[in-house]
Amino acid sequence: MKMTEIQELIDRQPPGMALEQPFYTDPDIYAREIDQILLRSWLYAGHASEIPNTGDYLLLEFANESVIIVRASDGEIYALVNVCRHRGSRICFQKTGNEKRLTCRYHGWTYGLDGVLHAAAHMPESFDKSNISLKRLHSRVFQGMIFVNFAEKPGNFDLVEQELGPRTAPYGLENAKVAHRESYPIKANWKLAVENYKECYHCAPAHPEYSRAHSLALPDEAYEDELEALMVRGAACGLSDDVFNKSYENSGEFGVDRAFERYPLLKGHVTGSRDGQPVAPLLGTIKDWDRGASDFKVGPLLYALAYCDHVVLYRFLPTGLDTCDCDITWLVRGDAEAGKDYDLQRLTWLWDVTTKADKRIIEHNHQGVMSRFYEPGPLSTMEDATDNWNRWVLQALSNSEG
Ligand code: FES
Ligand SMILES: [Fe+2]
């Protein structure tokens, strides 16, 4: 589809309605999304505790891109494009691992953990290896969470540190550890997965387990009073006492929508678990259970749900035009021991069961959207965040965005 046709589609898309079919099916729109959104945003790669030792690495992968997130001997974390500077082979293939140096299996070019080329055999005399390194991307570590940006001049990450930092600090995430990480492949266009995550209109019908504990499944007016009470309890427990509803429309650093938001859990629940009871020790500097949870976001594709005893990080990435991946990380206190301080099954139960349900409904959504009879329908008042997201995507795709 030509850009002029894409622009026509964007221009005629009314607010408050689902998107037209080509936004989920057209390869040129998808290619533009990769360029205009994915390659310009801060993307969550992993938690620093996953690569504690020199040579430890993990991969960040989406569409055709692959990045090696590696800890070098100076303790620094580098984000290196996983494309050999010789003839372009991938260098690391495992999702995680440890390497003393990064050696390309194809012809043996060898790079240091900082990406600098150390050895390349049988090259002509004119070859100067000091000019060649693996391409290095901008990366930032925010409270243990590693973010990568492909842009030459990425968006302002300091804003995340300044605005979000103090509000998430009580959770002590720089000292947390990954208790579990799991990838849920979804047979659907990636935007359908994000649209679904952004709204809780579907929570009551699709997530009975979640809806028992979380007030977001209720209409707004039903928990306003509860929210006020939570602010007081939260402050007493050492948590942020503001709701922080500030909107960062069109900010690549926070995506769109609220960057941080607190909400109360429903009666009988102190955390997001099957029985509402704790599943791990209190995080960071939190003094007591305030019976609340916090949502926060970094970039358009990392969504976090913070309870007093664990944090669930949700990351969506496209793996193709009609497939995507939902990667979930469960963080607990760094000194918590599995089997003693937490039971992995109890810890992961709620969001595993909820994500499997989401996977099902998103895939069914995709199947319906593929139909020749699909026609965009009107959104509900509980889908405002989805509508905002759609408009943000359209603006990012638009010519006028640059
Ligand atoms: S492609 Fe890597 S050494 Fe040839
Ligand atoms: Fe859901």
Image (cartoon, rainbow, N blue to C red):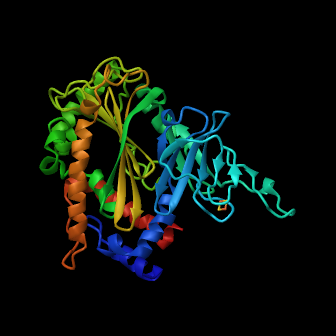
Q: Is residue 200 above or below residue 232?
A: below
User: In x, y percent, where is residue 27?
Assistant: 41, 74
Say whether residue 329 is visible.
no
Q: Is residue 222 above or below residue 84?
A: above
Q: Quadrant of residue 114?
A: top right
User: In x, y percent, where is residue 299?
Assistant: 45, 49
Q: Quadrant of residue 279?
A: top left
Q: Quadrant of residue 210?
A: top left
- How many circles with numbers are drawn on the protein? 0
Tell me which residue sits at (67%, 54%) in the image. 134
Q: Tell me the quarter of the image containing the N terminus.
A: bottom left
Left/right placement of residue 91 relative to residue 372 reads right
Tell me which residue sits at (29%, 74%) in the image. 21
User: In x, y percent, where is residue 117?
Assistant: 73, 51
Tell me which residue sits at (15%, 28%) in the image. 267
Tell me which residue sits at (22%, 63%) in the image. 365
Say whether residue 35 is visible.
yes
Left/right placement of residue 17 relative to residue 391 reads left
In front of the other: 326 or 266: 326
In front of the other: 146 or 71: 71
Q: Tell me the quarter of the image containing the C terminus.
A: bottom right
Left/right placement of residue 116 relative to residue 372 reads right
In front of the other: 69 or 257: 69
